[in-house]
Image (spheres, rainbow, N blue to C red):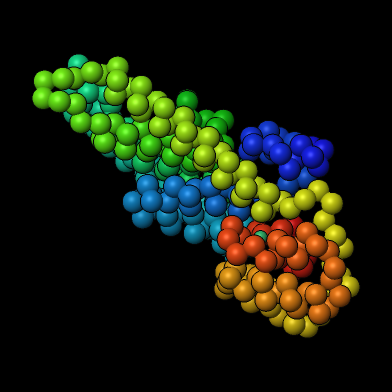
Amino acid sequence: MIPEIEWAECLEPGRMLEALGSTLSLRKKLLFGLACCRRVGFLLTDERASRALTLVERFADGQIGPDDLAAAQPKVRAAVEDASFERWRAEADTDFSTHPADSAAAAVEVAVYAVAALFDESASGHAPRTLDFEWAVGRTPHEHAASAARLWAEALSWRAYSPRQGEVRVSRYHRLGATAGRWALWSEEEAQVRLLREVVGPPDRPAVSAWLSEPVVGLTRAIYSKGGWGVLPVLADALEEAGCIDARLLAHCRERLGHIRGCWVIDLLLGRV
Ligand SMILES: [Zn+2]
């Protein structure tokens, strides 16, 4: 287990996941991956990919089973193949002597890879792998999602650079794109770390059974089923009335932003792992 101080300061989602190992339930792992994919959801223009995310969410919550995922697998696979074809076509249309590759199509492709990798994690052992391309295998959903964000930043950067008439400097294009991409990658990883902390919570979570009053339970269930994260500060008041004095738990409830399905406080109160 990663020491608490290191857990609080770590900025590498991969290292944190590795440290958690099997202590992180499949449900929590899927909800974290889901949130990472949704951060690049603007790239998921293919309805089959966004539908796959809904299925993963329902599977994580036990609303559907592995057979439902297996039935959907061919559509997710087709979305991956179409995204790869679109990227290949975009590259085929590019004159590399004057322009760098436009990475917008690659960003879309890799965002679909993130969804497919998450789908494969969910359907593992129940359906053929969706993502079996050599370089895509072995990468996690959050890694693909961060790469998609990097590629998108590169694409925007390149598009924003307008060389004067006749001045084509591919190396400058590449420098700009690489810098923007690097910053986007760091920023995405930082956001992913926040998501992981949101889902896992601190290593020393308090026992909550004494605070499960009727209002607390009612509010918690309503928040979870309706995704009403804005009501969490009200839950903090109800918890205090029930005798809760855990400052960290109350402060988390009073944070207005950053809560997602899998929020460690809501899960703790509902007894979900
Ligand atoms: Zn939360």
Number of numbered discs present?
0
Does 270 sit left or right of 144 as displayed? right
Looking at the image, which residue is at 42% across and 43% down?
112
Does 174 sit left or right of 179 as displayed? left
Q: What x and y, as percent, mark residue 101?
A: 28, 26
Is residue 240 visible in the rendered image? The answer is yes
Q: What x and y, as percent, mark residue 221?
A: 68, 75
Tell me the quadrant of the picture where the N terminus can be found.
top right
Q: Is residue 136 placed above or below 219 in the rendered structure?
A: above
Q: Residue furthest left?
A: 165
Q: Residue furthest bottom?
A: 214
Looking at the image, which residue is at 73% across and 47% down?
24
Ligand 1's quadrant is bottom right
Looking at the image, which residue is at 60% across and 68% down?
229
Q: Is residue 34 placed above or below 162 in the rendered structure?
A: below
Q: Between residue 204 and residue 168, name the one nearer to us.
A: 168
Q: What x and y, as percent, mark residue 253?
A: 69, 66
Q: Quadrant of residue 251?
A: bottom right
Q: Between residue 259 and residue 113, name the one nearer to us.
A: 259
Looking at the image, which residue is at 64% across and 36% down?
11
Tell me the quadrant of the picture where the C terminus can be found.
bottom right
Is residue 124 visible in the rendered image? The answer is no
Q: What x and y, as percent, mark residue 22?
A: 76, 42
Q: Is residue 173 placed above or below 19 in the rendered structure?
A: above
Q: Quadrant of residue 92?
A: top left
Q: Is residue 117 placed above or below 223 in the rendered structure?
A: above
